Image: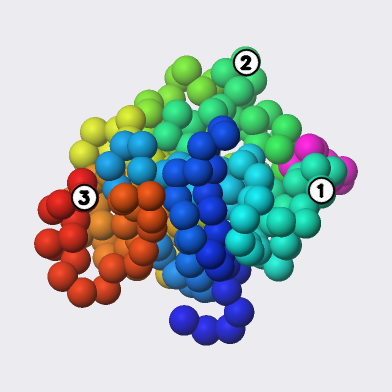
Amino acid sequence: MSGQPIISFRQADIINGEETVIFGLDMDIYPGDFAYIVGRVGTGKTSIIRTIIAENPLHQGEGSVCGVNLKDLREKEIPLLRRRLGVVFQDFQLLMDRSVEDNLAFVLKATGWKDKAACDKRIREVLDAVGMGTKAHKMPHQLSGGEQQRIAIARSLLNSPEVIIADEPTGNLDNETADGIMQLLTRINKENGTAIVMVTHNRSIFEKYPGRVFICRDESCHETRDEVGIDLQRTI
């Protein structure tokens, strides 16, 4: 751990709709971290992610992401925060009516890029980074699930984020394909120094690819350092 945390919560209550699902969250994620948020269904894992990306408001406690105070965040400032994050979802969330290249160009345009040559160059860079350099003109339905997730990861890299937020990114993939996605995320983490915060319920993933582990249970979320195996056996 070095420097200031890029994600920090202090005694933060995490909500899902009107219901508080986690009380008093304390969490610091630092540059270069690879951190997992784990726990059973309904324990608040995804609600933490939604709070980080400002989909869920923070009413109680303190929270900051990339230097932005979540408690004071106004709605018009949310897009500026999200430009500093990369987000990867379980269901890819690609636009099915346009090519891979046009999916990525849409994001660049939406985040303020105007120069076409610069956009084209950045699209080539991120596709090459995820091993999809030859797929720019494909439509999403022409790609496998693993390839679609690689495109989603490329999309998350477009604005050189400090942290990638990944919500069950391997949840819809078979084991071999999931392994490839984890190798890719691990490489991005190590080579770029990009922090990764990943929600998963798959114990084999965080056993094979070690990182910091935060366990959600009993309306709380805490980092576990000791007796990880015992804790996870009771939790997942």
Please report the residue visible at 66 percent of the width from the left and 37 percent of the height from the top. 104
Residue under circle 3? 235
Residue in the image at 68% along x and 29% along y: 102
Taking depth in this image into account, of 30 and 150 the one nearest to the observer is 30
Question: Over which residues does the magenta segment extend?
Answer: 108-118
Estimate the x, y position of residue 233 in percent, counting from the top left. Answer: 13, 53
| Circle number at residue 74 | 1
Image mark for residue 194: none
Position of residue 31 in the picture relative to residue 197 (left or right) = right
- Magenta stretch: includes residue 44: no
Task: Say what amino acid the circle numbered 2 marks.
Answer: Asp
Disc with the residue nearer the chain's start (3 vs 1)? 1
Q: Which residue is mark 2?
A: 97
- Above or below, 2 against 212 in this view is below
Using the numbered discs, state the Cα–Cα distance from disc 2 to disc 1 in whole angstroms.
32 Å
Q: Is residue 163 above or below residue 6?
A: above
Q: Position of residue 116 (x, y in %)?
A: 82, 41
Between disc 3 and disc 2, the foreground one is 3
Nearer to me, 47 or 4: 47
